[in-house]
Image (cartoon, helix red, strand yellow):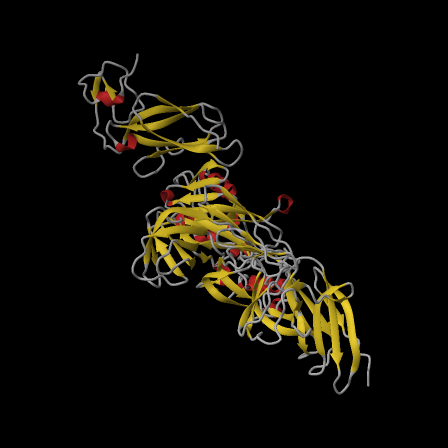
């Protein structure tokens, strides 16, 4: 369809689109240069004709600075509808008071591109139309050059730039990779945005299925400590997610679902579709008497944001935000909490932080590489996972491995799993450093180093003077002092002699389940001795074996040979 | 014998030169001139406005600045340049008439080579005038 058929020029210099609607047969799309050429073609006619009131007697309609920058002059103008049918550059009109800038998206064919402007998603996303006769979303594609969309966005109106002409383009199609591209102030002509849009092999679960995984939730929104790397010292994050019964990849899929296109979920006060994670870390001082909320909207002269964490609501020195509009605050600007009304000042340093897409980080399928500041409960992490705390320091969780004994009879079987040596139970894994003879002993000191793969709490067996090894629960141990902390125990009779044997009994109980297990931090392969005895109603011959606790854990099935 | 500009004739009591017989307002009768008063909207004669350096194929239009109407005679005031020099004969009016204040438009936007629209203003007088048209490729 010729441009002259799809557009008309009215007597009042309004240039209007009169062609078919998007996706309909005959819908026309033209470059800004084509518009200019058409106008100039009409302008040198001796007389106007039809619905295009432009000829030599009329004012000059347009000026071309470059092929991609067209200025409508002398009152000629387009409206938003006409702009939807133009691409490949900018249209400037009303003496510069109104500007439509060109956007060109480099992405896989069919990408659904969202444009965030002034803190909100532009609802009229005409550029995602499937052209008539086409099969993929995207107006004015140029697949030979990897271009999926070309269109214009109004960035200035009434003589004022819309949020500094900033645009954020993003793809958030569930099942595909997420990406975003920030145009920090469009320029005249074509603004290129590169996005990734391809199948996410770690996001293969049906959307309807993932929508039901509501047991995954953020236990703590805001600044909180997690000892992700199990070094007995908390690191700090802006979230503490519980993946509940889900695998780490299912957790990843849930995070994508929460922030997908069309999400109705709310994260930190923002619609999931707009949630990006921390964009800036701000050093602050001079707090007001009023406390900040743990999470709230914030503003400052020249911008707004959503505070995702603050290290102290009463006396903060650090604040982490997602920038929503404008520019980040600068030194000594006042930041005001939108809910609390609390204030503080920027103390020199504002650090831009890296974003991940999706906001939680990346999944390898079996592990997560967490985004900056994104926290997950320590117990939900494995040694293959990696997280980054709010100092952007990589924290590697320990490799927790599980050893299981299966095939047990509840209430009858007694299980003992301990260290093995030469195929037998290693009863002197440790030796006592000093006799235990007090009436209320709580510390058991041994001579040997306590291995790194010792459970943080559990049970030990201690050799007593009569030769028996008694079971004692310990609540903690100190590897430095080689000391186990046990509940107060009276050793005044039948004491435990100096040099007596002590060993860890990893499982030491009557079966309460058909499978009993323990979890430790993997350090190196360990050979275990397993013993299952049942002298009850259905007695079995004692089952004894050794097994290896390796990097992926281990298990043993009890062989039940009747001893009836 | 050279003719006097017609605008001067009304101020002379005697014609000493051959009168411009194209001026309907003046007749020579026995060495005595007879003048006729004209309205400001009536031309007092013609002049030649020459456009030079015009891109061949460009359309030109000479219009009045006041209302944008074509200069007169209208048949001359608009056309397509067949050569780079375009002489245009136009009516000229008494000095001070707004009808002498013209806008010259030259455009070529229909086929390559395209040129940016050019507009310039001119006030014509009974003397021939020339305008250099410096078109810029678009």
Residue B109 placement (x, y as % from top left): 49, 36
Placement of A273 over or under B137, stated as above or below: below
Q: In screen coordinates, is A475 left or right of B67?
A: right
Say if A341 sits above or below A58 in the image: below
Question: Which picture quadrant has residue A171?
Answer: bottom right
Does A422 appear above or below A323?
below
Quadrant that contains the C terminus of chain A = bottom right
User: Dividing the picture into quarters, in which one does residue A439 lie?
Assistant: bottom right
Q: Is residue A517 left or right of residue A481?
A: right
Q: Nearer the viewer, residue A106 or A258?
A: A258
Q: How many marks?
A: 0
Where residue A225 appears, x then y in whole percent?
48, 61
Q: Is residue A521 visible?
A: yes
Residue for point 43% across, 51% down: A281
Q: x, y percentage for residue A246?
A: 61, 68
Could you tell me residue A374's position as x and y percent? 52, 58
User: Camera-side residue: A173 or A157?
Assistant: A173
């Amino acid at each position: 369809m010729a441009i002259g058929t799809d557009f008309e020029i009215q007597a009042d210099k309004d240039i209007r689109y009169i062609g078919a609607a998007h996706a309909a047969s005959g819908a026309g799309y033209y470059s800004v240069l084509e518009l200019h050429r058409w106008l100039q073609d009409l302008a040198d006619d001796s007389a106007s004709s039809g619905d295009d009131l432009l000829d030599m007697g009329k004012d000059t309609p347009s000026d071309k600075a470059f092929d991609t920058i067209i200025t409508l002059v002398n009152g000629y103008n387009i409206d938003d509808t006409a702009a939807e049918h133009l691409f490949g550059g900018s249209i400037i009109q009303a003496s510069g008071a109104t500007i439509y800038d060109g956007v060109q998206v480099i992405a896989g064919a069919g990408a659904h591109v969202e444009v965030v402007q002034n803190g909100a998603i532009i609802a009229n996303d005409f550029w995602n139309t499937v052209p008539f006769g086409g099969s993929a979303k995207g107006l004015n594609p140029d697949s030979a050059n990897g271009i999926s969309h070309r269109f214009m966005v109004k960035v200035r109106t009434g003589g004022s730039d819309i949020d500094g002409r900033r645009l954020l383009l993003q793809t958030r199609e569930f099942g595909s990779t997420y990406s975003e591209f920030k145009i920090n102030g469009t320029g005249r002509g074509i603004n290129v945005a590169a996005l990734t849009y391809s199948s996410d092999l770690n996001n293969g679960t049906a959307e309807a299925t993932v929508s039901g995984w509501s047991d995954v939730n953020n236990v703590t929104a805001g600044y909180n400590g997690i000892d992700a790397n199990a070094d007995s010292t908390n690191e700090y994050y802006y979230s503490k997610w519980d993946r509940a019964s889900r695998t780490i990849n299912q957790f990843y899929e849930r995070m994508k679902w929460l922030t997908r296109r069309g999400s109705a979920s709310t994260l930190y006060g923002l619609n999931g579709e707009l949630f990006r994670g921390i964009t800036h870390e701000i050093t602050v001082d001079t707090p007001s008497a009023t406390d900040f909320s743990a999470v709230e909207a914030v503003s400052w002269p020249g911008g707004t944001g959503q505070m995702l964490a603050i290290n102290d609501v009463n006396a903060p020195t650090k604040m982490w935000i997602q920038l929503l509009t404008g520019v980040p605050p600068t030194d000594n600007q006042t930041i005001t909490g939108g809910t609390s009304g609390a204030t503080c000042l920027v103390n020199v340093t504002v650090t831009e932080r890296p974003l991940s897409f999706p906001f939680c980080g990346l999944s390898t399928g079996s592990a997560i590489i967490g985004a900056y500041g994104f926290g997950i409960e320590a117990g939900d992490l494995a040694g293959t996972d990696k997280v980054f705390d709010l100092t952007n320091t990589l924290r590697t969780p320990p490799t927790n491995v599980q050893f299981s004994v299966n095939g047990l009879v509840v209430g009858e079987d007694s299980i003992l799993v301990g260290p093995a040596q030469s195929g037998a139970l290693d009863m002197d894994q440790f030796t006592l450093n000093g006799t235990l003879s007090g009436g209320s002993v709580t510390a058991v000191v041994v001579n040997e180093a306590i291995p790194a793969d010792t459970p943080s709490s559990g049970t030990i067996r201690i050799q007593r003077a009569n030769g028996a090894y008694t079971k004692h629960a310990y609540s903690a141990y100190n590897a430095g002092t080689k000391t186990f902390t046990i509940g107060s125990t009276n050793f005044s009779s039948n004491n435990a002699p100096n040099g007596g044997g002590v060993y860890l009994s990893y499982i030491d109980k009557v079966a309460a389940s058909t499978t009993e297990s323990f979890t430790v931090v993997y350090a190196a392969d360990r050979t275990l001795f397993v013993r299952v005895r049942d002298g009850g109603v259905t007695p079995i011959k004692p089952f004894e074996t050794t097994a290896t606790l390796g990097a992926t854990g281990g298990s043993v099935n009890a062989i039940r040979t009747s001893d009836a | 014998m050279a003719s006097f500009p017609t605008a001067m004739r009304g101020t002379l009591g005697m014609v000493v030169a051959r009168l411009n017989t194209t001026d309907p307002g003046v007749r020579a009768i026995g060495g005595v001139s007879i003048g006729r008063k004209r309205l400001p909207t009536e031309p007092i004669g013609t002049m030649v406005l020459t456009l030079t350096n015009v891109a061949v194929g460009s359309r030109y239009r000479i219009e009045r600045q006041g209302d944008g109407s074509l200069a007169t005679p209208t048949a001359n005031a608009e056309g397509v340049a067949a050569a780079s020099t375009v002489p245009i004969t136009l009516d000229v009016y008494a000095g001070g008439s707004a009808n002498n204040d013209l806008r010259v438009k030259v455009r070529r936007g229909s086929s390559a080579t395209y040129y940016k629209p050019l507009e310039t203003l001119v006030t014509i007088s009974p003397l021939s005038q020339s305008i250099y048209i410096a078109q810029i490729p678009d």
